[in-house]
Image: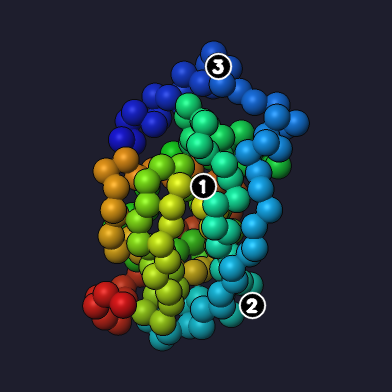
Amino acid sequence: MYVLETLKKMFEQVTSVGKRSSASMRWFIRRRKAHRAMFEDDGAIPNNSRLPFIHYRSPVRLTHAQDPAAVFEDLFESNGWRDSWRNGIYDYLHYHSTTHEVLGIARGHARVGFGGDGGKIIQLRAGDVVILPPVPVINAFQRAATSWSLVRIHPRENMTNARGQAKSTSAR
């Protein structure tokens, strides 16, 4: 899936096929409530106790999109966030200690853990957006679709990626 998504993105960048204007991006957006959570340091992995984790349920319409990942890429770029990439979520605990990260769920659905042992497991679906402040821990517990993919973006020049070890590995 990663190779296919990378090839699609390269084709779109070279040919500009499917490139949308900022004005046309408005059709894909709908207002949604921000679901916020605060994660405390659990003793094993730090969490950001000042900035919230934010999850929007389906603020991006993907129903008629030929390439849902491209919708997120264009949306992020129209807001000044460049250099996104298509990927999944690592199957081990990890976090970025110095920068925010935004995830746009392009296809499928999965149960994903955020915040370490004391955090939450959230069902993510195509069209969802997650905004992580520096440090909240990400761990994929269960991918429920074979075509699961997402678009990630964060300022790479400030990125520090750290791998963590949870106190327990039991599912919540």
Q: Disc 1 marks which amino acid? A: Gly
Q: Residue at x 63, y 64 (%)?
A: 34
- Residue 82 place in picture, x, y as percent: 62, 38
Q: Would you call the spot at circle 1 few (<14 residues within 10 Å), some (14-19), or many (20 or more)?
A: many
In this image, 82 relative to 14: left or right?
right
Q: Disc 3 marks which amino acid? A: Val
Q: Which residue is mark 2?
A: 50
Identify the image's colour scheme: rainbow, by chain, secondary structure or one colour.
rainbow
Q: Would you call the spot at circle 3 few (<14 residues within 10 Å), some (14-19), or many (20 or more)?
A: few
116, 98: nearer the viewer: 116
Cα distance in 3D space between marks 2 and 1: 27 Å
Q: Quadrant of residue 50?
A: bottom right
Q: Which residue is mark 3?
A: 17
Quadrant position of the N terminus in the picture: top left
- Residue 107 place in picture, x, y as percent: 41, 42
Where is 41 relative to 149, above or below? below
Q: Disc 2 marks which amino acid? A: Arg
N-term-proximal mark, 3 vs 2? 3
N-term-proximal mark, 2 vs 1? 2
